Amino acid sequence: MSTFKFNFLGISDNEKTEDKNEEIKWFECEEIIPNKQIDDLDDIVVHAKMFVCDDVEIGHVSSCDKLFSSGDYQFNALELAEKEHSDLIAGKYEGGFKVWECTSDIIKYLIDTDINFKGAKVLDLGCGVGILGIYALQNDSIVTFQDYNKEIIECVTIPSVLLNIEKEQRQEIIKKCKFYSGDWASFDKKLTNTDVYDFILTSETIYNEKNYEKLTNIFLNRLSKDSSAYVGAKTCYFGVGGGMRQFEMYIQKTGLLNSEVVWKSSGGIQREILKIKRI
């Protein structure tokens, strides 16, 4: 079996590509219930790495070889990503194993603005490792984690969440979390009418303009009047077509959402954070 290692791809964020002529069949949403991960956690701690931003330290899984080798999990998407040497294969693997750069931007913004998450319902959309949701959980939120690939949720997200909970509290705290895999449209349909969130956090999820309608519908359906979504992304994703200006224009066309750039990077590849609220 080939070995999949964190950040093994070594390609830039700007190299997210897809075959525009291929008809994509998106995965249906599934709710994933934490089970075996709790028992296996001690075996994968040795594969953990640390995400650090200011005073925030969040442990996360950096290799899922141990879980994969057990035979209890499929790893089709990650094996395909390694074979294709790509961080994105549209409809098959959506980059969930990588901690994208804008995740740090959002964490720092949340720290600097001292947003109160206590008791809030938070959706970490396109969560990958789950850094944003784990930060919210550490600040007393009730968190829903969503990512496209089921094996990301099973082998990366859930173990990473558990790594940041004291052993004696894991069974109780994990009950404050829900985990879903699959396409955004399918995910939105699976939720009930009462499933709305105080905060939606999402990092580097606007690179594909074909998914703007799905993403916008989640904001429309899952934000209450006083809720906010924070979208961290590159100003432009070269060679792909997506970017902040294109997404802002799409948001404005709804006539139901208001967007505001609340943060911009000062150097390097231009990055921004967009705050979205209902009108």
Image (cartoon, rainbow, N blue to C red):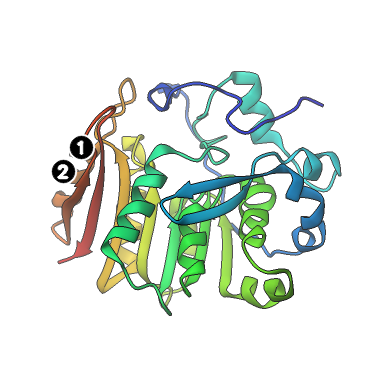
Identify the residue at image location x=82%, y=51%.
43
Quadrant of the drawing holding the N terminus: top right
Q: Looking at the picture, which amino acid does disc 1 mark?
A: Gln
Specify the quadrant of the image occupied by residue 174.
bottom right
Between residues 266 and 157, which one lies in front from this camera angle? 266
**Left or right: 48, with 116 as reference point:** right
Q: Name the mark on residue 131.
A: none
Identify the residue at image location x=66%, y=58%.
163
SS for callout 1? helix
**Left or right: 1, with 111 as reference point:** right
Whether pointer 1 and pointer 2 mark residues with C-beta atoms closer than 8 Å, the reply is yes
Question: Which residue position is annotated with label 2?
Answer: 249
Question: Which residue position is annotated with label 1?
Answer: 246
Identify the residue at image location x=51%, y=37%.
94
SS for callout 2? helix
Between residues 144 and 49, which one lies in front from this camera angle? 49
